[in-house]
Image (spheres, helix red, strand yellow):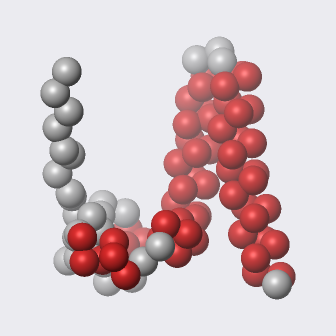
């Protein structure tokens, strides 16, 4: 099986427009070299939590409550970790 690189795309989120990110390529090597995974995850934490919850909702609708709970657990851990880092 041949793996193909997925081309980088412009951000389609309205929040990205508010932050002036529509013209930048979030997948560029230069940007990746200056930001850590944690910094990027913190910047987009709300978006990530929303996406995780949407995934969990879809799994609930598909009759997979155990899988939904797993993803909600990931979201809860991310939110808790963010809350603890903000208190420090």
Q: Name the foreground residue: 70 vs 23.
A: 70
Query: Quick check: 74 left or right of 20?
Result: right
58 in relation to 26, above or below: above
Query: Quick check: 36 left or right of 42?
Result: left
Q: Is residue 17 visible in this depiction of the protein?
A: no
For the point 32% across and 83% down, which residue is it?
A: 20
In the orientation shown, which residue stands out farthest toward the top? Answer: 63
Which quadrant: the N terminus? top left
Q: How many marks?
A: 0
10 in relation to 71, above or below: below
Which quadrant: the C terminus? bottom right
On the image, the x and y values in percent for residue 84 come to: 81, 72
14 in relation to 9, above or below: below
Residue 23 falls in which quadrant of the image?
Answer: bottom left
For the point 38% across and 68% down, which residue is it?
A: 14
On the image, the x and y values in percent for residue 56 come to: 62, 35
Q: Is residue 45 visible in this depiction of the protein?
A: yes
For the point 61% across and 55% down, which residue is it?
A: 49
For the point 74% across and 32% down, which residue is it?
A: 69
On the image, the x and y values in percent for residue 22 come to: 25, 74
On the image, the x and y values in percent for residue 38 come to: 55, 69
Query: Quick check: 15 left or right of 10?
Result: right
């Amino acid at each position: 099986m041949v793996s193909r690189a997925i081309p980088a795309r412009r951000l389609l989120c309205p929040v990205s427009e508010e932050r002036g990110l529509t013209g930048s390529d979030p997948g560029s090597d230069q940007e990746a070299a200056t930001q850590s995974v944690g910094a990027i995850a913190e910047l987009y934490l709300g978006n990530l939590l929303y996406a995780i919850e949407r995934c969990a909702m879809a799994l609930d609708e598909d009759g997979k409550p155990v899988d939904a709970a797993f993803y909600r657990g990931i979201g809860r851990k991310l939110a808790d970790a963010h809350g603890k880092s903000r208190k420090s």
